[in-house]
Image: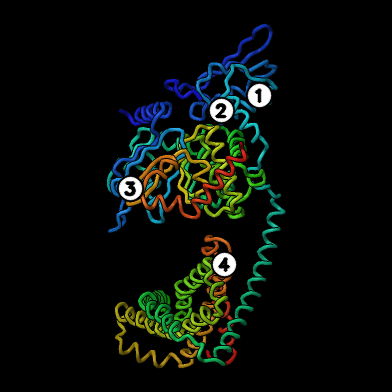
Amino acid sequence: MDQTSALMNKAADLSQEVRDGRTIIRLSGNLSIACLNDFPDRLDAIEGPVAAIDLSQVDHMDTIGAWVLHRTMQRLDCGITGDRCDAERLLATVGQAGDPVNIRPDRVAPLQRVVGQIGEAVVNSFTTLMGLVGFFGGTLVATWNVIRHPGRFRINAVVQRFEVVGVSALGIIGLMSFLIGIVIAQQGSVQLRQFGMEMLTINLVGRLTFRELGVLMTAIMVAGRSGSAFAAQLGTMKLTEEVDAMRTIGVSPMEALVLPRTLAVVVMMPLLGFYASVMAVIGGGFLCAISLDIPPITFIQRLREVVPITDLWVGLIKAPVFGIIIALSGCFQGMQVEGNAEEVGLRTTAAVVQAIFLVIVIDAFFAVFFTWVGWN
Amino acid sequence: MAPEEEIAAEEVRVEEAVAKDGIAISVRNLKNSFGDQLVHDGLNLEVRKGEIIGVVGGSGTGKSVLMRSIIGLQTPDEGEIHVFGESMVGRLDDEALAVRKRWGVLFQGGALFSTLTVAENVEVPIREYYPNIRPQLRDEIAAYKIRMTGLPAEAGPKYPSELSGGMKKRAGLARALALDPDLLFLDEPTAGLDPIGAAAFDEQTRKLQQTLGLTVFLITHDLDTLYSICDRVAVLADKKVTAVGTIDELLATDHPWIQEYFNGPRGRAATAAVSRQKDKRR
C-alpha cells in the first residue's frame, strides 16, 4: 500500500489500448470501495480477449478493489502487469477466499412452505396443549407433596405474590372496571330508551358485570400483568440457569416457583373479580345518576331486586379456574424458554395469548353449564 | 459552507490523515464517570498507525468504556478524542461519517443482527454506506469476507442463533471488516473461546492486520494474545493509562499491578510458551 502518495481520492478509472495486436487494460486512480462508483460495471462491460491488466498507475487498492479485479481476471483469463507486490498480496488473499458462499437460506417452494407451516402449527398446538396438561399434572403432584409435608410450604413467597398480583393491581383494575360499567350503562340506556325501558339498564349493568364481565376483564388484565410477568421471570431464570441451580441444590422449581405463583393468582382472582364487579356497578350507577336521573338509592334497591345471588356465585366460581389457567400458562411458557433472550419475548407473548384464549373458551363452557344447572 | 461541501472537505481531511504516517487515535485528558464513581481521570493515549495495541487492566478499570468513548457510544465528561485527526467528542451518530466508514468494531458478544443471516450481516455496512454497489457484487464481497475470516462457506446463510461462540466472533469480525477499515476495534475477541480457537483467531487477526495494513485497538484479558500479536500494550490502572510500551518495556517498570500481571503464574506460563515457540522456530 503506497502510504505516501498524496490525496488518494482520485476515482478509479480504466482505459483500453492495443499494443502489438494485444489488448491491454490500463487501470488508474484509487481502487478502493469509496472511489469505485461505476468502475465495476465498466470493467464488466469489457469483452475479451485481453492480454493483461496494467496496474502501474493505480494509487491505492483495498480488498474490494482487489476482488473486482480478481473476478475480472478470472472472467477474461488474463494476468496483471505493473510490478505491484501490494496488489499481488491482496489478490492472493481474496483469491484464497474465493469459494462461493450462500447469502440466504435456500428458498422453499411457496406451496410446500405453506403446507409445512400449517403442519408445524398443528403439531405445535398439539404438543403445547399436551405440555400444558402435563404441567398441570406436575403442579398437582407438587401440591400433593406440599400437603403431605406442610413444612415445605413457602408462605413468604405466596404472601409476597399476593401483593404483586393482587394489591398492586387494584388501581388499574378498579379504574378499568369503573369505565366499563359506564360504557355498558351508556350503550345499554341508548338502546333501551327506544322501548322506554331505561330502568332495565340497571338489570343489564348488574347481571352482566357480576356474571361475566367483572371476572372476564379481571382475568384479561391479570393475564396481561401477572401471566406475562411469570413467563418473563421464569424464562429469564431458565436462561441464567437459576432453575438448574435450584434443581441441583434439591429445591423443586415446581414447589418453589410455580406453586406460590399459582396459589397467589387462584386466591386473588375471586377477590379481584368481585372488586371489579363492584367497581363496574358503581360506574354504571354513576352514569345512571348523571344521565338517566336515577338516584343512587333507587339504583341500589333495584339492583338488589333484579340480580339473583346466583350471579355472584357464577362469577366467583369461574374466577379461581381462570386464575389457574393464567398462572399455569405463564409458568409453563416461562419454563419452556431455551436458548436466547429472544425466546423470552416470544414465550411471554405466547403466555398471554394462550391464557386469554383459554379463559374465553372455558368461559363459554361455563355459560352452557350454568344454564344447564338452571342458574340463569 | 454547504453541508455537502463540509462532508467532502471532511472526507479529504480524513483521507489525508489516513495516508500520512503517524497517529491514528489520540485521547487527551479523558474523564469519564458514572454517578459518583470516577472511571477515567486525565487519561492519555496515542495509538500509532499500523500497530496492534493491546489494552489491559483489571476488571472495572474502564477498558470497554475507553473503547466506547473513542467510537462515540459514550460521551465523556471532559477531554478530547481525535480519530484520524477528526474530533469525535459530542458528534452525533450521523456525523463524522468519513471517520465511521474507516473503522470496524467487533463487540464482545459479536452483536450480530439476529434477524439477518451471517452474510446479510456483513452486507449491512456496504448497503448503508455504498448503496450504488450492485447486489451481485455485494453478495460476492460478503462471500469473500466470510471466507477471509476463516468461516466455512456453510456459515453464510445461517442465522446468528445457529452459530457457536467462536463462529459468532468470526462473523462479527467479517462484518467489522466489510468496508475494509483502516482501524479495527476488538473487544475481548478471544474471551470464551477454547485455546485452539483463540490461537487461530489471534493468527487470523495478525494475518489480516498485515495484509490490510490495519491499526488494531484490542481489549483483552488473554496473556497469550498479548504476547503473540500485540506490538505495544497499554495498561489501564489508577483511572489512567499507567504505562504503554512493548511487554519488555512494561516489565522494566515497577508498577505493582504490571509486575503482578506479567509475573503472576499465568503471565510466566505465557512467557514460557512464547519462548518455547521461538526455540522451535530456530
Q: In the rendered view, does B245 fall on the left or right side of B80?
A: right
Mark 4 lies on residue: A337
Residue B73 visible in the picture: no
Q: CA distance from mark 4 to mark 2?
A: 46 Å
Mark 3 lies on residue: B240
Of the two numbered discs 4 and 2 on the same chain, state the one appearing first in sequence: 2
Subunit under mark 2: A
Of badges 3 and 1, the one in the foreground is 3
Residue A208: x percent and y percent?
A: 46, 82
Q: Nearer the viewer, residue A135 or A201?
A: A135
Q: Secondary structure at mark 3?
A: strand
Of the two numbered discs 1 and 2 on the same chain, state the one appearing first in sequence: 2
- Name the outermost residue toward the top: A20
Amino acid type, label 1:
Met
Amino acid type, label 2:
Gly
Amino acid type, label 4:
Val
Of badges 2 and 3, the one in the foreground is 3
Mark 1 lies on residue: A73
Crowding around mark 3 (Cα neighbors within 10 Å: few <14, some 14 to 19, many 20+) is: many
Q: CA distance from mark 3 to mark 4?
A: 43 Å
